[in-house]
Image (cartoon, rainbow, N blue to C red):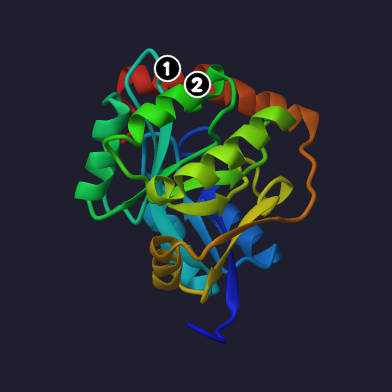
Amino acid sequence: MSGARRGLADPHCHTTASDGMVSSAELVRAARRAGLDLIAVTDHDTMANAREVRARGEEEGLAVVMGEEVTTRWPAQTHVVGWFLERPVPSGRPLADTIDAIHDEGGLAVLPHPFMPTYFASCQPRMLEALIRTRALDGIELLHTSPITPGRLRDLRAFYEAHQSRLGAAIGASDSHFGEHDLGRALTAFEGTTAEDFRRSVLAGTTRPQPGRRGSIPLPLLARQQWRSLVDLPLRRLRGDLA
């Protein structure tokens, strides 16, 4: 890929299929306006909108990776993102088993927003240290837009430097829930522009996280999203409405 253009990806995005505030069409439209080459649609515990996003992306010249942000077993309920999935990975399994299930489906397993407080469903340092003794990740988010203290961010980067061979590619992602308001605030640069290029770059460890554009979320919209995330989504999960 020497000399090839480096694409820009935001590989952690949500829609109204889970707790996002945008439809499939709105997500694709926001990605095109942001000048992105690729997005990954990673709704919580469902892939209900994934095929529609991919189809709309094809129409608009946007590469789309189908994925899922999987909730692992209670009480930790740490999240893990699967990319390049064709069907959902069941939630509620131990973290290590969830990574195995993603790999069994031919997907890539990526750890989102690590080292944040546990109520963000974030993997903690000791948990991650224990995990990588027996499992290797394909990537880890080193740059994201979720709140993390400067000290924790330094710890994360130091941990990555010490264990890069087990943690995989360095990833930047916005964890977008609001389309044009927050998409593209944290990005992953990769060699090429297609979904297959992105996969190769992740596996080769040649991705580079980089900051993107600034964005602001209107407070009324943020309040509605928090209700979806903290009330509506858990109720739908309990009812078995996610698929």
Badge 2: residue crowd in 10 Å (few <14, some 14–19, many ≥20): some
Q: Residue 80 in the image: x percent, y percent? A: 40, 37
- Residue closest to the far front: 162
Rendered view: 62 above or below 150: below
Q: Secondary structure at mark 1?
A: helix
Name the mark on residue 120. Answer: none
Quadrant of the rendered image containing residue 221: top right
Q: Is residue 76 left or right of residue 101?
A: right
Instruction: Identify the image quadrant of the C terminus.
Output: top left
Please report the residue visible at 70 percent of the width from the left and 62 percent of the height from the top: 34
Residue type at mark 1: give it.
Answer: Leu
Residue type at mark 2: give it.
Answer: Asp
Q: Secondary structure at mark 2?
A: helix
Badge 1: residue crowd in 10 Å (few <14, some 14–19, many ≥20): some
Quadrant of the rendered image containing residue 212: bottom right
Residue marked by disc 1: 235
Residue closer to the observer: 40 or 48: 40
Residue marked by disc 2: 232
Q: How many marks?
A: 2
Q: Residue 106 in the image: x percent, y percent? A: 24, 55
Rendered view: 118 above or below 114: above
Please report the residue visible at 32 percent of the width from the left and 20 percent of the height from the top: 73
Residue 157 in sight from this viewpoint: yes
Residue 14 in sight from this viewpoint: no
